[in-house]
Image: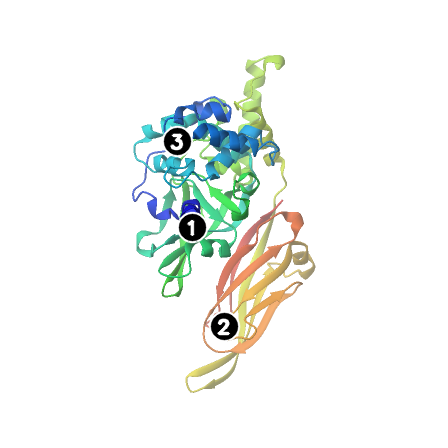
Amino acid sequence: MAQKNARVARFLDAAQEPKKELTPIEGYEKTDIMTLQQSMQSMATTLHNLDTMVKIALRNSRKPANDLTSDESAAIHLYTMQWPETHASVYASLNEDLRCQNRRNLIPWFPYMKLFFTALYKLPSLRGTIWRGVRGNLNDAVGEDLIWWGMSSCTEKVNIMEHFVGTDGERTLFNIECTNGKSIRAHSYFEEEEEVLLLPGTYLQVIGRWSPSKDVHIIHLREAPAPYQTIAPPFETSSTAGDLPSLKSLAISEKSPKTSAAATAAAKQSVSKTAAPAATKSKFQNATLEKVQCENERKKIIKKYLVIGNTHELISSDNDKTKYKWTLFVELNNDDQDEIAQYIKQVTMDLHPTFKPSQIILNKPPFRLTKTGWGVFRIKLTIEFHDQWKKSDFHTSWDLSFSDAENQKTIEIEFQ
């Protein structure tokens, strides 16, 4: 049990984040790419039995997914491995130094950070809802926004996070709308955790707070561009390629396609003027990264606008109870039922427990639910997309409103 608690600790360490903002994480990007064994040599006297753990990670990563090299995949694998209870793991030691205001503590980690962050950068970015948790109530400790300086371990499955955080005592769950999450399941020592990593320096805005019970607190966060560059990207860039603001904006080229395309074109033009074709030098130290970046820029992004809302009709008003007939809907802004069927596989609506059944699953359009009742309450929505879009389930909620003739919100969803 103690070993298991230590293993899930990285999912529950949000309270260890520093209370003040730190200086950017930089310098590691100038290190040359090394093998995993070479990159961990500087930590050999710090981490117990490191050579054996590295060899295990490499042996478990001989057939890596996502076009990663064995060393890149093993760098992720090593991060997820659990050391014996009395010894610090890679993730515990690295996160302690990432959260420390003395950035010199990171210098011994530079070779590993270069390999590790390069591997994460090459993974596709996940857009969707992920979960993180902590024991205790963090409502008072979280303001309007925050920066997480450590590696943030999250999961796509709320039931996994609920299992980690426990079912008694005060606890806080973070419901995070991410745009740059990195799913590492295919590279993790513990695949069943379905772990998603947020990179150091991730900036998050607080969208809302909700306490479904006196001991459970949910804080709704949304990833956004940081107000300054919190972490350098894991490669050096040519000065002619323009400033690249953060690892997050690079990993998702559709965030600023014109800028990315222009920067790429400028870099290519600069290279062609300064070097012969046979001696052309990539602006990336790892040529595979350039290929990944170019492929990202060529991807076609389809933007759709999802509308969630409700209409209502007054049925009766008796003493203190006003009864309504209401309809909750999920639709595209053009209300094209044939088109929405191409994107959405099913919509699950979790109602107030007084409704029987309290969970409604709609597996074809129109995605509408009509009921009668009184009182304002919150409905949880899970929107599942067709497999071809390779998108995680989208989780949101809707507070049933009877104040206006129609109340709705619009959400931009990107497909590729």
Q: Amino acid at mark 1?
A: Met
Please identify, in this view, whether the residue under mark 1 or under mark 3 is nearer the observer: 1
| Residue at 34% over, 56% down | 136
Please report contact status of discs 1 and 3: CB closer than 8 Å, yes or no.
Answer: no
Residue of label 2: 353
* Other residues around mark 1 within 10 Å, as few (<14) / some (14–19) / many (≥20): few
Q: Which residue is mark 1?
A: 1
Q: On the rendered image, what quadrant is the C terminus found in?
A: top right
Please report whichever mark, 2 or 1, sits nearer to the chain's N-terminal start.
1
Q: Label 2 amino acid?
A: Pro
Q: Position of residue 301 (x, y in %)?
A: 61, 43
* Residue 376 sits in quarter: bottom left
Point out residue 66 in the picture as x, y percentages from the top left corner: 60, 36
What kind of element bears circle 2?
Answer: loop
**Callout 1: SS:** loop
Q: Is residue 23 left or right of residue 174?
A: left
Of residues 141 and 193, the one drawn nearer to the viewer in this rendering: 193
Q: CA distance from mark 3 to mark 2?
A: 50 Å
Q: At which x and y percent is residue 27? A: 39, 26
Are the two marked residues, 2 and 1, in contact with CB atoms closer than 8 angstroms?
no
Q: CA distance from mark 2 to mark 1?
A: 34 Å
Taking the image as shown, residue 63 lies to the left or right of residue 17, namely right
Mark 1 to mark 3: distance in Å? Answer: 23 Å
Looking at the image, residue 200 lies above or below residue 29: below
How did the renderer colour the structure?
rainbow
The number of numbered discs placed on residues in the rendered structure image is 3
Residue 219 placement (x, y as % from top left): 40, 56
Going 42% across and 50% down the picture, which residue do you hit?
Answer: 1
Depth order, front residue of 260/60? 60
Q: Which residue is mark 3?
A: 47
